[in-house]
Image: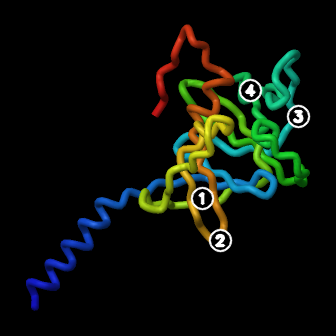
Amino acid sequence: MTITANHTLAGANAAKLERQEAQYLSFPLGPERFAIEILKVQEIRALTTTTPIPNAPTHIRGVINLRGTIVPVVDLRRRFGITIDADSRFAIILVVSVRARVVGLIADAVPKVLTVGSDEIAAPPELGQRVDLSFVSGVLYRAQELVLILDLERLLATEFDSAEAPLAVVG
């Protein structure tokens, strides 16, 4: 009987080792929820006034001065075509570090931290060539809602990377 108990305990420990967990910040954009890797987030700031950039796409809200660094700010609602209005009193800027760049992302409210096992994340659905989901790395079903996990490197690559000079990925 002792052998069986030890064997069962060893099997449970092996299962824990195989199941890798990661933490994500989950935030709302309109009626939808999105998440990003917590390790990419530098800080969370209240939404402040941005300085517009002439001729920028409409989802590039402008730039902010973050302790002497000029940071571009992307409005994720506009980027994803979400037209449902939100209460801007709760909006925030997630300052993220991606591919050696610092970028601000506007979200509707303060995010929640989710600890997610790798076995809980499903692959993004295949919707054909007309729907670009290349920036979605997975889908999580939690608490009766779907959460799209964003691949920030792919999402922001089209905005800020030049084809001539690929940037090194920052941890």
Which is more foreground, mark 2 or mark 1?
2
Q: Residues under labels 1 and 4: Cα distance? A: 24 Å
Disc 2 secondary structure class: loop
Q: Nearer the viewer, residue 98 or 125?
A: 125
Residue found 66% across the figure and 21% down from its top: 160
Three-letter amino acid code of the residue under disc 1: Val
Residue found 68% across the figure and 24% down from its top: 159
Which quadrant holds the N terminus? Answer: bottom left
Residue found 52% across the figure and 16% down from its top: 166
Which percent across, then down, holds residue 34?
A: 66, 51
The residue where tag 1 is placed is 113
Coloration mode? rainbow
Within-10-Å neighbours for mark 2: few <14, some 14–19, many 20+: few
In screen coordinates, is 53 left or right of 158?
right
Is residue 38 among the parts visible in the rendering?
no
Three-letter amino acid code of the residue under disc 2: Gln
